Amino acid sequence: MIAIRAPYLDIAVLVLGITILLLETFFAKVAKRNFAYAGIFFLTAVLLASFFISPESPTQQTGGFWNFYAADALSIFFKRFTLVTTIVVLVMMVDYADVVRKAADDLASANLGEFFSLPLLTCAGLMYLVSAIDFIFIFVSLELVTISFFVLVSFPRRNPIALEAGIKYLILGALSTAFLVYGITWIFGVTGETNLQRITASFAAGKIDNHAATFGAVLVLVGLGFKIAAVPFQMWVPDVYQGAPTPITAFLSVGSKAAGFVVLLRVLQPFLMLPNMQRLVVLIALLTVVYGNLAALPQNNLKRLLGYSSIAHAGYLLIGVACFDGRAVTFYLVAYLLMTLLSFAILIIVAQHTGEEISGFDGLAKRAPFLAFAMLVAMASLAGLPFTAGFVGKFFIFVSAVAQKQTALVAVGIVTVACGFYYYLKVVRAMYWEPSPNNDTISVSVLSRAIMVLLIIATIWLGVYPQPILNALKH
């Protein structure tokens, strides 16, 4: 088998993003969608190449230049996760290109190339982030991701809602970065290290000030809490999700959240031995689950509903983090990827005809039976109905909480799942029970239809047979 080193994948994606950005600048007459198709093709090639990488154990990563970089099974798995997410987002962007062109008028032809290239730079940053085992590298990778999102969120510059979303994301993103850097400073002051493995060794030696270390850890948790949209650091989510271009909302909801949780799992590992740290994570998980579900109940805008829903799912993921069950968190993130990308892919197409309100889905089963069925699968999985990946994901999370005797997390989690049934099934009711306002048919491109079919199959397949994901981190 051909051996490929993990860092080469990240570098290849970074070079691809820069190349497409330069080509867009110097070849203005080339159809901009070609840049998206090129990105999809080359990312698929990188995804296939990732299966030729052999995971390295922690003992193989300690020393030398790459002591800040992990190429273990977890990081390689989430590199593939990030690549799949970016490929699907680029497909969504092709469908969304007409919306961007209309919003920018005559400037759209010059800007679409940037719109298609920036997600590649974001993808590179996310791939670096899931391999980062040093606070300095975590910070640099996080900034590459965050700055790319700053631009993408406010990309429709003539849309005041998008500009408002971009400003809110910029201000709160800068604030979260300040918390993160200040926390890293405290931890470095206490341990004299920024490498997570060496920090773990310092804690094991028992020669550090626990109070100062706890303060630094809390600051880092606050900084990462903004990134994963945990309560009380979630205030940016509804407005940013609603104002950003829909493919970017999907990218924020899935890619950014997944990388944030991988970093959280790595960072919290040495700090959970500190007094009360686990209790703090449990408290944040409880608040996040309750707030996300209750705030989603009255929403009538589907994009905003999915924003509050993402907060609720962050809460369920935090339950897995509090129990430090990496496999449960990993499976839930995969399930979340499938059902969230599927729902946003459908929303992009339907919204161009009837808007983003749930009422715009009235009678969709008659106008576009395939889209209605796909959204039914997505909503069923998000709600946690049996035989879907969402159900199995929640099951593993709750089993983990039961094993750790976290009774409060289990009780609150099960009650809030019932809330989810109400607001997710509102969309199903609109599609199948409400009368259609018109008889216009909605067409779906071949590429988008193929992606949706794959997402539907994967959502149901993992709901019946979850073993492939559970075994993935063993190899």
Image (cartoon, helix red, strand yellow):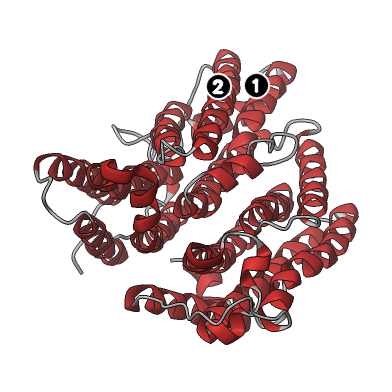
Characterize the local packing of mark 2: few (<14), some (14-19) or many (20 or more) Cα atoms within 10 angstroms.
many
Give the quadrant of residue 91: bottom left
Q: Which residue was labeled with disc 1? A: 216
On screen, 188 above or below 422? above
Q: Position of residue 189 (x, y in %)?
A: 57, 13
Residue 172 is left or right of residue 58, and the answer is: right
Identify which amino acid the numbered label 2 is placed on.
Answer: Ile
**Toward the viewer: 264 or 294?**
294
Q: Quadrant of the N terminus?
A: bottom left
Tag 2 residue: 184
Q: Is residue 193 left or right of residue 48?
A: right
At x 24%, y 62%, the residue is 37
Crowd rating for badge 1 (residues with CA inside 10 Å; few <14, some 14–19, many 20+)? many
What residue is at 9 percent from the left and 46 percent from the top? 27
Say if residue 349 shows up in the picture.
yes
N-terminal of the two: label 2 or label 1?
Answer: 2
Indicate the position of residue 90 as horizontal and vertical percent values.
Answer: 35, 58
